[in-house]
Amino acid sequence: MYAAKLCDKPTKKKTPVTIRTLLNLAKKQPMLFTKGSHAEVIEAANKCWKIISGLKVPLASIEKRRHESLAHLDANSVMNPGQLKHTAPLTLADLEKIFEGTEEILRSMDRFFTGLVGEIIFLEQDDYRAVLRIAADAKRSATRSASPKQPRPTAESE
């Protein structure tokens, strides 16, 4: 569903905010992209449209699957659930290709907003230990603040 939503096509009834919306905006109103010249923005948008064109086949499969079984349950999909693998073939490699392509597009266009160029990553995005450490620290902190304070020994009490 996420891959389908990233590259959704606008319709007469709705204009979703997607990769296509971003690229259309870049071509029609390049002045909104403040970190580059109008020509650079339009050139980058044209290159990004080529990436979208290269994803046409897997995106069509995703769209068919989405409309027939995920978002709108088609009667044919209910009666023959295995048919989609033949009519709309989709592999994990196809999904990876779509997400890599959309990441490349976002990096390419983001530099005209932020001025930054590079891979989209989150610090320690695959490190579950960091999450566990933060949770443990929070629990220790909560335990310390909830425990009754012990009076400090004084010279008189010794």
Image (tube, rainbow, N blue to C red):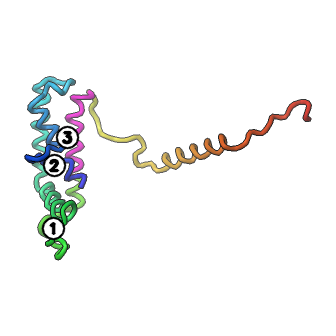
Q: Amino acid at mark 3?
A: Ile
| Residue 60, quarter of picture | bottom left
**Where is mark 1, residue-wise?**
74
Residue corresponding to mark 2: 8
Position in image of residue 29 (x %, y %) = 11, 29
State left or right for residue 128 relative to residue 95.
right
As rendered, which of 94 and 10 lies closer to the eye? 10
Q: Quadrant of residue 109?
A: top left
Q: Amino acid at mark 2?
A: Asp
* Badge count: 3
Of 118 and 34, the residue lying toward us:
34
Look at mark 3 in the image and give the residue it sits on.
105
The range drawn in magenta is 97-114
Choose the circle earlier in sequence order: 1 or 2: 2
Question: How many neighbours does mark 2 have within 10 angstroms: few (below 14), some (14-19), or many (20 or more)?
Answer: some
Asked where in the image residue 19 lies, by quadrant, the reply is top left
Cα separation, mark 1 vs mark 2, equals 20 Å
Q: Magenta span has 112?
A: yes
Tag 3 secondary structure:
helix
